[in-house]
Amino acid sequence: MNINQNYKNLTESYLFSTIAKKVNEFTSLNSGVKVIKLGIGDVTLPLCKSVIDAMHNAVDEMSKVETFKGYGPEQGYDFLKNSIQNYYSKRNVVIEPDEIFISDGAKSDLGNILDIFDRANTVLIPDPVYPVYVDTNIMDGRKIIFIDANEENDFLPMPDFSLECDIIYICSPNNPTGAVYNRTQLSKWVEYAIKNEALILFDSAYESFVSETDLPRSIYEIENAKKCALEFCSFSKMAGFTGTRCGYTVIPKDLNFGGLNLNKMWLRRQTTKFNGVSYIVQSGANAVFSEIGQQQIKENLNYYKRNARIISDTLDTLNIKYTGGKNSPYIWLKCPNNLNSWEFFDLLLNKIGVVGTPGEGFGKNGKNYFRLTSFNTLENTKEAMERFYDLFVLK
Ligand code: MLT
């Protein structure tokens, strides 16, 4: 019996599990301290009313023989795919319903999609990055080339046309840096992918945080992107579904590599290995796209955006450099006093009971950076930043 030896090449535990362990140790020794978590990007506001109403209705439907649902289509119900199609069409992006696959979230799809790619492919990944892209490729033993995202390129690395690769990961608005590519920059990536006959895996999980209207929220807003890109999105951050679980992946129908069609391969993969997202959850997700649903999620998004402003205003006052916050729930700051990111993590936890995410957990370029999220409550965000201010103002 041979096991997958590639697992030996992974770090011991997933970043957020390591952080949770450290926080648990701290709280067990300091039970009197109110710990405020601005670490993992987990939402705090409840699901909006339209989503809850739709899910209640769906539960009622499940209780009657006439409306009860058994297995649904593995790739998602038409009603939800049509709503997503319509959502894209508002930004003049044409996506067919059978190019959309509903899943339980972007993380699963980003990992599972690798099933349809050869393990000999070379993967291009920015550093720092959402660790899932790296770990899932290490598990498969793929060769990874890292490209630097740093202060010099405003954390938005551009393609090096002399570099060859097969799969390219882009996340914009970016996790962890909050930086967002503009149209010209994304067009360069599309041009590079087409020239290389490579495929872009575009993670748009944070698109709903884009406030500046001229910034692209989908790779398909860029000409020719349907010839070289898949898009992964999620209801987690858009509508507070981190615990409810729903997302979707777009695979254009005309994408063929090595004589095989990616859309058909993914359909084959999903129908074999996945039985779809529950009707109740898909009904809730669908309500997000109603007029009232859109208004309600906007209120929640604005709430988090206000938190982001509180964080960035504090950093401005303290003269601490950062990116993100404006079009993203993440604020990526340079650790003050030349601390490295784990030292800074320990300092914040031990001195002020505030939890963030050490930049090093996202790659070597994060060594002196730290990520804060705007997903906690207004009160907690204010309190955390007051404590933060007091800690650094006199230093
Ligand atoms: C994060 O904190 O980076 C995200 O919550 C992780 C995720 O969405 O899986």
Image: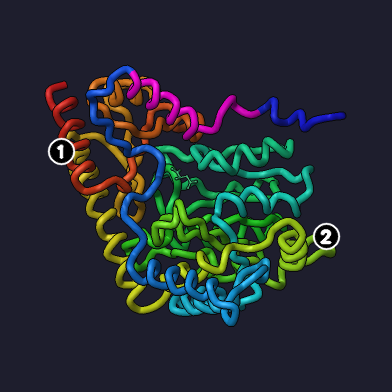
Q: Name the side, left or right, on which 9 lies relative to 61.
A: right
Residue that sits furthest to the bottom in the current view: 66
Q: Could you say which disc has been placed on residue 241 in the image?
A: none
Closer to the camera in the image, 123 or 253 = 253
Residue that sits furthest to the top in the current view: 29
* Amino acid carrying mark 2 in the image: Gly
Q: Residues within 10 Å of mark 2 (few under 14, many from 20)?
A: few
| Colour scheme employed for the rendering of this structure | rainbow
Closer to the camera in the image, 354 or 258 = 354
Regarding residue 107, the answer to whether it shows in the image is yes
Closer to the camera in the image, 23 or 348 = 23
Q: Main secondary structure of the magenta part?
A: helix
Q: Could you say which disc has been placed on residue 317 in the image?
A: 1
Q: Position of residue 197 (x, y in %)?
A: 72, 58
Q: Name the side, left or right, on which 64 lies relative to 328.
A: right
Position above or below: 8 against 233: above
Closer to the camera in the image, 317 or 155 = 317
Question: Picture quarter containing residue 336?
Answer: top left
* Amino acid carrying mark 1 in the image: Thr
> Residue, x 87% and y 29% (percent of image)?
1
Q: Position of residue 79 (x, y in %)?
A: 55, 78
Q: Which residues are magenta?
A: 10-28
> Residue, x 36% and y 46% (percent of image)?
330
The residue that mark 2 highlights is: 258
Residue 23 highlighted magenta (yes or no): yes
Q: Circle 2 sits in a helix, a strand or a loop, which is it?
A: loop
Regarding residue 190, the answer to whether it shows in the image is no
